[in-house]
Image: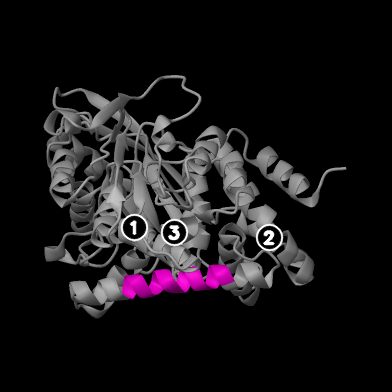
Amino acid sequence: MASAVDTFVAGVIARNPAEKEFHQAVEEVVESLMPVLDKHPEYRRAKVLDRIVEPERVIMFRVPWVDDQGDVQVNRGMRVEFNSAIGPYKGGLRFHASVNLGIIKFLGFEQVFKNALTTLPMGGGKGGSDFDPKGKSDMEVMRFCQSFMSELFRHIGADTDVPAGDIGVGGREIGYLFGQYKKLTRKFEGVLTGKGLNWGGSLIRPEATGYGEVYFAEEMLKTRGESLKGKRVVISGSGNVAQYAAEKVIQLGGTVLTFSDSSGYIVDEEGIDSKKLAFVMDLKNNRRGRISEYQKKYPNANYQPTSAGAKSNLLWDVKCDVALPSATQNEINEIDAANLVKNGCACVAEGANMPSTPDAVSVFLESKILYGPGKAANAGGVAVSGLEMSQNSMRLAWSREEVDQKLHSIMKSIHKVCMETAEAYGTPGNYVNGANIAGFLKVADSMMAQGVV
């Protein structure tokens, strides 16, 4: 006989075929929520779960643009406005060839719970395009962003839907998008976060996701009387999140060993210090090069190219104490998780969205290591986006120290509510259940209060 979880997920799959990432995200959350629904039958009667997995609005549109050769290109743009029960839709834009509706819906669904955990008044949404900025000139990126915003501007606003950056959308892209929005609407408002400091951005916003990920890891380690000082740390990715996670680990006395990109990964057993990190930041942010160039600069490091069709990622077979997956979804499978545990990893904090497959999560939970899921551990980015929105609304700017202090406080609060909620529902130490249930309760109660809408 099928369980309640299986029956519900089967219904979601039937209504949303070929959206495997979305199915995975829903199943993970629903598994955590069964004890809540048993304890609160009013949620079942009001069909809160059925409503919460259905986006309030899905917008898809054509994005035509002209490349440097004068040829017309056509991409697809989308925005999924998932849930606005506790505030305006909030979530990033992802520009990457892999983007499809299933990925955007998974990200938007995760964002609903993540934003609720921050304690800030933000609903959940996500958007993006199958356009890939990699290898494009600044002028091509500008023309694409202007075309993209020429449709998106109709659907967003400072009190309606506030996008931000994600994979493929950094400061350059946010600038082009904001410029076009301002031109079309004649409004200078906090409609996008991740803006430049001279035009409404917040200090600490670029660092926020990576810093927050490390703050969360540090809080988890404290529950066992430990800290990051002296710990060997493996980090995947080499973009914004990975860079600033590494910076904070170095500041807290840990040793960063790895970085990666889609072409491969590097291992530096001597440790990646501040000077080496500065090289990576210049390589990735300014020269937009490949991580393989790290070995040319620092020959003692080992570079391994990505092997097509490999059953595991050898980056996760590096001996470490702490793992910070900060690249993309489903980058850690069951074999990778087993390798991490085998090599002594005691703490995993996710900087990417859903970087661990369900089988990998099972390995982490069964081994009783500290495991912080993305919707809790990487909520620092959207938390500071919320603080940027507050600063924009008040027409002021807080100092670096103020924003960092608020970020640190929010991450401590998220850790505390995850711990307390997991314990209250009979699974002490299970941050997955704690995060899912705590986020759900805030959104569900708000939905109940607002009626069937």
Compared to residue 380, the image places residue 64 above or below, namely above
Give the residue at the far right of this rendering.
1
Magenta segment boundaries in residue numbering: 406-419
Identify the residue shown where x is 63% and y is 77%: 449
Q: Marks 2 and 3, how far apart in space?
A: 19 Å
Residue 413 within the segment the image draws in magenta: yes
Q: Which residue is mark 1?
A: 209
Q: Marks 2 and 1, how far apart in space?
A: 26 Å
Amino acid beneath label 3? Ala
Q: Quadrant of the N terminus?
A: top right
Asked whether the viewer can see residue 193, the reply is no
Q: Which residue is mark 3?
A: 377
Q: Quadrant of the C terminus?
A: bottom right
Count residues near mark 1 (Cα–Cα under 10 Å), then give few for <14, some for 14-19, many for 20+.
many
Q: Report the disc number at residue 33.
A: 2
Q: Quick one: label 2 or label 3, which is nearer the N terminus?
A: 2
- Mark 3 secondary-structure assignment: helix
Q: Quick one: label 1 or label 3, which is nearer the N terminus?
A: 1
Give the residue at the far top of this rendering.
308
Left or right of 280 in this view: 439: right
Amino acid beneath label 2? Leu
Q: Quadrant of residue 182?
A: bottom left
Q: Quick one: label 2 or label 1, which is nearer the N terminus?
A: 2
